[in-house]
Image: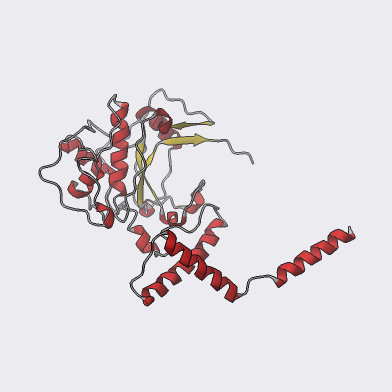
Amino acid sequence: MQFTVAATIAAATLASTTALSTEGSNFLLADRFETFKVEHNKVYASAEEHAERFAIFEENVNEIAQKNAVNNVHGITRFSDMTKDEFKFFLGVDHTMKADPTVEVVRADNVTVGSTGSFNWNDEGKLTAVKDQAQCGSCWAFSATETIETAWAMAGNSLTEFSPQDLVSCSTKDAGCNGGMPSNAFDFVKAQGGLPTDASYPYTAGAGDSGTCKSPLPALAGGTISDWGYGQTPCQGFTACKEDTDGLIAALKQYGPMSIAIDAAAWNSYTGGVMTSASCSSSPRKMDHAGKLFQSYIQPFSV
């Protein structure tokens, strides 16, 4: 017992004498910033811009530490020298666009939602590869395109990569790199009669330019839409969304992956793992990013 106490005191003394000074912390932060610049090919136009980006980087590192106290899935990413407003440009859902009241909520029939288990459309070979929208707020176009790709394959056709660039440049209800909604994209594809392939109309909006709609349009390769519906009652206004989890899981199993809108403001520092609801908002006014729901996972919680 005396040895244990002595060892504890010695360890405490050592910890106190080796704590980093402010100068040491600043040195490590500056060193990590240099590594960050190399990792993500960051080049700044002037010493002033370098100083500004370093200050933003420091602020984001402090916030990462605070986030990890709630959800330990954050770290330094390629967005770590950007402000929150700059990061929002990489998202792209325009929450001011309202749901179409004439579109029905689709209910799944004869689908059992258990209390445990998982389901993943990737296991069924119905998903195309993950894409990168780059520096363009075109998530809505990728969300819609990839949802259509799976639906097309589920209908018995070959799994085909369709063109999100067609939507970004040609969907007049949306704003290209300045945002849009998957629902508008579905209406556009339905009216157009399908989509060209990604190979025939490749993505060029990654630098933030929506581009001009091609004329003539490349040949439509499929992806026709006869109709579409909501998986649950759309969330709008100022009231927090109430998710119909069972309804969404049942629709996912019966009808396939679906486009979703989420609050992705905290994703600028996401590096991997499970992000809980504590990291995001359920307010419709906070929905700023579109994605594709293709997997359900249910696990009972014990208290």
Q: Is residue 121 above or below residue 281?
A: above
Name the side, left or right, on which 184 lies relative to 82.
left
Residue toward you, 230 or 223: 223
Q: Position of residue 197 (x, y in %)?
A: 22, 38
The residue that appears at 41% across and 46% down in the rendered structure is: 241
The residue that appears at 45% across and 37% down in the rendered structure is: 245
Residue toward you, 198 or 97: 198
Name the side, left or right, on which 50 lies relative to 276.
left
User: What coloring was used for the rendering?
Assistant: secondary structure
Q: Position of residue 280 (x, y in %)?
A: 46, 52
Query: For residue 209, what is the image quadrant?
Result: bottom left
Name the side, left or right, on which 105 lies relative to 219.
right
Q: Is residue 2 above or below residue 217?
A: below
- Answer whether residue 80 is visible to the viewer in this image: no
Picture quarter with the C terminus: top right
Q: Is residue 194 above or below residue 14?
A: above
Q: Position of residue 278 (x, y in %)?
A: 51, 52
User: Total label count?
Assistant: 0
